[in-house]
Amino acid sequence: MTELSAGYSLAGTDKLAGKPLLLLFIGLFSTAVGQAFVFAIMPPLGRSVGLDEVRITAIISTSALVFTLIAPFWGRFSDKVGRKPIIIIGLLGYCVGSLAFAVLFAAAGSGWITGTGLFLTALVIRSLQAATMSATNPGCMAYAADHTVAQYRTRTLARLSSANSLGMIMGPVLAGLVAGFGLLAPLVVASFLSGIAAIVVAWGSPKACRLEHRKISPSASVILMRESGCI
């Protein structure tokens, strides 16, 4: 069963399991691990380049607020362009954002940028990263809901939610291990993990099939997709 990009969803026509479920789980898990990395290393990393606790907290809190405010937009946008592109945007956004964050703090460690300039740049980078990475969660959840019958939907969404929980539990432990190679190492690893997850989702998930947005019944939309070879 493939994804319905626009118009009507395939909710109630299938049970999401196996490879599609695993791909969504990987995407959510990699993002959660990356977030846990940042929460674990941000205080010592910030102090190492002269940022005080107030500025460190402001960076973390502002990015969390941006994440919360922007996530619903991605959910609505996925109704128009499809779930898979939104998931990939979120993962790639986290990949690029983590790498940019690492480069910024490497420059700060070398004395190229300090003080207020460092704080404002870190705030902007982290906020932009949060704005894009917030696409992953609603994209994955909407994809799962589209492809799961009502009787299995709660169980499927609970399994995906466990990816976030597992990532947040394992993240600090992994960050502590990786930080032995330097405080910037967790950021680089987080970027790598989300980049790999984006590639896996892009190549491993079913192709997207798009229907014109028109007033047809859900059953008719499924018939049209079957006739076009999408399912």
Image: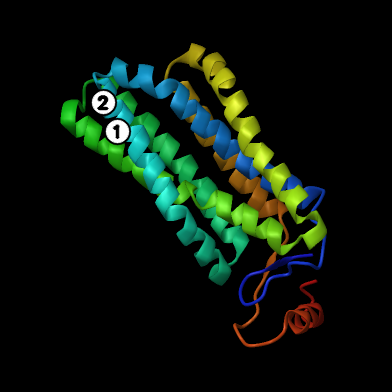
Looking at the image, is 190 positioned above or below residue 24?
above
Amino acid type assigned to the residue bearing label 2 in the image: Val
Q: Position of residue 157 (x, y in %)?
A: 70, 49
Image quarter hosting the C terminus: bottom right
- Which label was assigned to residue 48? none
The answer to whether mark 2 and mark 1 are in CB contact below 8 A is yes
Residue located 44% across and 36% down the image: 98
Q: Which residue is mark 1?
A: 58
Looking at the image, is 135 positioned above or below residue 169?
below
- In the displayed structure image, the side of residue 192 where residue 70 appears, left or right: left
Q: Quadrant of residue 84?
A: bottom right
Q: Secondary structure at mark 1?
A: helix
Residue located 35% across and 36% down the image: 61
Residue located 21% across and 26% down the image: 112
Mark 2 and mark 1: span between their CA atoms?
6 Å
Looking at the image, is 41 positioned above or below residue 138?
above
Observer-nearest of 149 and 170: 149
Residue furthest left in the image: 116
Mark 2 Cα-neighbour bin, 10 Å: few <14, some 14–19, many ≥20: few
Mark 1 Cα-neighbour bin, 10 Å: few <14, some 14–19, many ≥20: few
Residue 44 seen in the figure: yes
Q: Position of residue 41 (x, y in %)?
A: 43, 21
Q: Secondary structure at mark 2?
A: helix
Residue furthest bottom in the image: 215
Looking at the image, is 82 positioned above or below residue 102?
below
Q: Quadrant of residue 83?
A: bottom right
Q: Please tell me how many numbered marks the rendered image carries.
A: 2
Q: Which residue is mark 2?
A: 54
Q: Position of residue 117 (x, y in %)?
A: 18, 33
Amino acid type assigned to the residue bearing label 1 in the image: Ala
Residue 126 seen in the figure: no
